[in-house]
Image (tube, grey):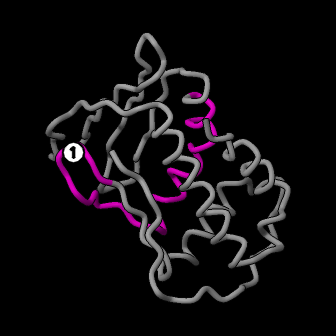
Amino acid sequence: MHLKLSRLNHSIKATHFRAYDTELDDIRSILMDACRLLEHHVIFVVSGFGQDRWPVDTGTDLPVFLEQLPHVLKAVKNSEAIDIDFYEQGVERLIRLTPCDTGDHYFLHCTGRLDWVPNPSCSSMDRDRLLEMLCALSDDFMVLITALSPCIAAHPWVARWKEVSSTPRP
């Protein structure tokens, strides 16, 4: 499995984000708005389990992944099992991350909820490499959201997301 943000050659111009209502919005609102603004600047790349490029996009699937990222990083850091759910229509895949007994690597099991069948459906990854990949994606996203709007990058919801998503690398 591989996850990354691949930047296109377009420069990102700072933009104004809407005001967020504490009763109606949360970090998901900011992630969704930011990812929609980044659609023409970044490609969200997911590969593995027999498919070089999953049918994911930056505007819809990236915010779904980013919403889960703090929990995934915390679980991997603590050598706990967790799922990454690509639940959006058209993708509908689940990756179950299960630590091995020694905790130094993870077993990854992918299931598809549509016609696509992963082949192979299982793989393994070094825990440190998995953490590095996830942290790199988090760091890359923070660089991009800061370029979009330093003000929104400093928003308390984003700061809290960043704090949890910036798990120190091993």
Between 126 and 154, the residue placed more toward the observer is 126
Residue nearer the viewer, 110 or 136? 136
**What quarter of the picture does the C terminus occupy?**
top right
Inspect the magenta stretch and tell me whether residue 140 lies in it. Answer: no
Answer with the quarter of the image where residue 77 lies.
top right
Residue extending farthest top? 101
Amino acid type for the residue under numbered disc 1: Leu
Q: Is residue 152 above or below residue 95?
A: below
Q: Which residue is mark 1?
A: 114
**Residue extent of the magenta highlight:** 47-75
Kindly state the secondary structure of the residue where label 1 is placed. loop
Give the image quarter of residue 68. Answer: top right
Q: Nearer the viewer, residue 14 or 33?
A: 14
- Report the side of 73 relative to 161 (left or right): left
* Residue drawn at (16%, 36%) of the image: 120
**Number of numbered discs on residues:** 1
> Residue at 48% across / 22% down in the picture?
81
Q: Residue at x 58, y 78 (%)?
A: 37
Residue drawn at 31 percent across, 52 percent down: 91
Instruction: Locate residue 140 relative to residue 101 in the image: left or right.
Output: right
Determine whether 73 is above or below 57 in the image. above
How many neighbours does mark 1 have within 10 angstroms: few (below 14), some (14-19), or many (20 or more)? few
Q: Position of residue 160 (x, y in %)?
A: 79, 48
- As for residue 62 lying within the magenta part, the answer is yes
The spot of residue 162 in percent (x, y) is: 73, 51
Q: Quadrant of the N terminus?
A: top left
**130 sits left or right of 67 in the view:** left
Where in the figure is residue 24, as x and y percent of width and height? Answer: 76, 56
Instruction: Judge whether 156 appears above or below 145 on screen.
Output: above
- Is residue 116 positioned above or below 34 on the image? above
